[in-house]
Amino acid sequence: MTMTNKSLAQSYLRKATDRIDVLHLLLKKGAYSDVIREAQECVELALKGMLRFVGIEPPKIHDVGGLLLEHSEKFPEDIVSDLEKLAFISKKLRKERELAFYGDVDFIPTEEYTREDAEKALEEASFVVLTATRLIK
C-alpha cells in the first residue's frame, strides 16, 4: 500500500467519524431526513477509505458495497465476515440519498422520515465507521 492510499484512507475515516458526531446533533434537532442523507455520506467515505486501504481505487459513485464483495480476498478475515452487511447498508442508504435530500412531488423529506428511520441510519453508519476503524487504524 502506498503512503498516499494509507493517508487518504485515514482522511476518509476521519471525515466519516466527524460526520457521526454531526448525525447525533441532527437527530437531537429532529432533522431526520438530514440524518439519512449524512449517514449515507458517512458510509460512502468509510467504505471508500477501506477500499483505498487495501489498494483499490474507489470509483466516483455513491455505492461501493459491491466492490467490497468483489475484492473480499484483500480484507482480513475479521472484516470479511462483515462485508455483506456493509454492502447491504451501502446499497440501502444509497437508495435513500436523493429522496432524503431533495424529496419528490409526493415525498416531503422533512415530513416522511421518522425518528426511528434516523436512528436506524445512525446505527448503521456507526457500524460501518467502526468496522472501517478496525481495518484502517
Image (spheres, rainbow, N blue to C red):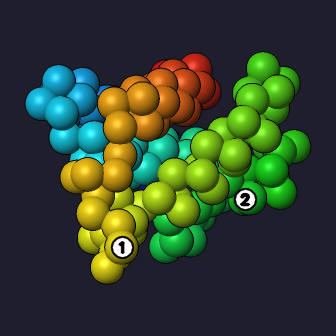
Whichever of callouts 1 and 2 sits on the residue coming sooner in the sequence is 2
Secondary element under disc 2, as helix, strand or loop, is helix
In the image: residue 67, left or right of residue 28: right
- Crowding near the residue tagged with mark 1, few <14, some 14–19, many ≥20 C-alpha atoms within 10 Å: few
Task: Give the answer, above or below, for where 112 lies relative to 18.
Answer: below
In the image: residue 132, left or right of residue 17: right
Tell me if I can see residue 137 in this picture: yes
Name the residue type under label 2. Answer: Leu
Q: Give the residue drawn at x 43%, y 37%.
A: 117
Q: Percent x, y for residue 10?
A: 40, 37
Task: Give the answer, above or below, for where 14 lies relative to 34.
Answer: above
Quadrant in the picture for residue 103: bottom left
Extreme residue toward the front, this view: 106
- Crowding near the residue tagged with mark 2, few <14, some 14–19, many ≥20 C-alpha atoms within 10 Å: some
Q: Percent x, y for residue 63?
A: 58, 61
Q: Which residue is mark 2?
A: 67
Q: Percent x, y for residue 105?
A: 31, 79
Q: Give the residue drawn at x 12%, y 30%.
A: 29
The number of numbered badges drawn on the structure is 2
In three-dimensional space, the C-alpha distance between marks 1 and 2, rounded to whole angstroms, equals 33 Å
Secondary element under disc 1, as helix, strand or loop, is loop
In the image: residue 75, left or right of residue 53: right
Q: Percent x, y for residue 60?
A: 49, 73
Q: Nearer the viewer, mark 1 or mark 2?
A: 1
Quadrant in the picture for residue 79: top right
Task: Give the answer, above or below, for where 41 lies relative to 83.
Answer: below
Name the residue type under label 1. Answer: Asp
* Dots 1, 2 in contact, CB < 8 A: no
Toward the viewer: 129 or 10? 129
Toward the viewer: 72 or 105? 105
Residue 106: which numbered mark, if any? Answer: 1
Q: Give the residue drawn at x 17%, y 24%.
A: 28
